[in-house]
Amino acid sequence: MSRVSVQEDGLLNHAQAAAVLEVSPRRVAELVELGRLTRHDFLGRTYVSVREVLERREADVKAGRPPRSLRQKVRTVTRVVSNYDPVNAIIDAVNPEPKKRKK
């Protein structure tokens, strides 16, 4: 364990890595399963590399789905409009639904 710890600049358990990355311990486990973080097992416990955790934190990985391109947006609107009934389009243009108020 000490040799690996020196090579990886230390080892963290999932809870500690989650605190550094500001995510849940389950997300750290998912990153290990996906191969984004290397798994190290010692005495029945699972650890991840401090070096890899810090690299991931510095990478400033954005959460969520990436934004869609203009082409993808236009294609989606085209699909929706092609399935839209012309009568309903006229009704919506003349009498739009009121916006919901936030409480």
Image: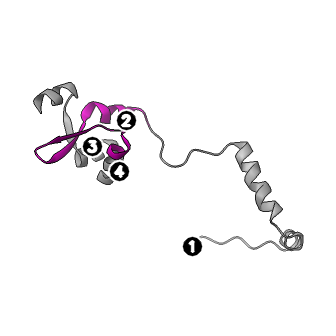
- Dot 3 or dot 2: first in sequence order is 3
Magenta span includes 32? yes
Identify the residue shown where x is 18% and y is 42%: 41
Quadrant placement of the C terminus: bottom right
Tell me if mark 4 has few (under 14), some (14-19) or many (20+) residues whose alpha carbon lies within 10 angstroms of its own. Answer: some
Q: Amino acid at mark 1?
A: Lys
| Residue in the picture at 43% in, 36% down | 60
Return the mark for residue 27. Answer: 4
Q: Give the CA distance from mark 1 to mark 3.
A: 38 Å
Say what secondary structure mark 4 lies in. Answer: helix
Mark 2, residue position: 56
Nearer the observer: mark 1 or 4; the answer is 4
Circle nearer the N terminus (1, 2): 2
What range of the chain is rendered magenta? 31-60
**Residue position marked by numbered label 3 in the rendering:** 17
Taking 51 as reference, is 28 above or below it?
A: below
- Which mark is first along the chain, 3 or 1? 3
Residues tagged 3 and 2 counted as in contact (Cβ below 8 A)? no
Q: Which residue is mark 1?
A: 103
Q: Position of residue 2 (x, y in %)?
A: 11, 30
Helix, strand or loop under label 3: helix
Q: First in sequence: mark 4 or mark 3?
A: 3
**What whole-number distance in Å separates the C-alpha atoms at marks 3 and 2?**
11 Å
State the SS at label 2: helix
Q: Which of the two marks, 1 or 2, is nearer to us in this view?
A: 2
Asked whether disc 1 touches disc 4, contact meaning CB atoms under 8 Å apart, the reply is: no
Q: In x, y percent, where is residue 21? A: 33, 42
Amino acid type at mark 3:
Ala
Question: Which comes sooner in the sequence, label 4 or label 2?
Answer: 4
User: In the image, is residue 19 above or below residue 80?
Assistant: above
Q: Are marks 4 and 2 in contact (CB under 8 Å)?
A: no
- Residue under the point 32% across and 38% down: 37
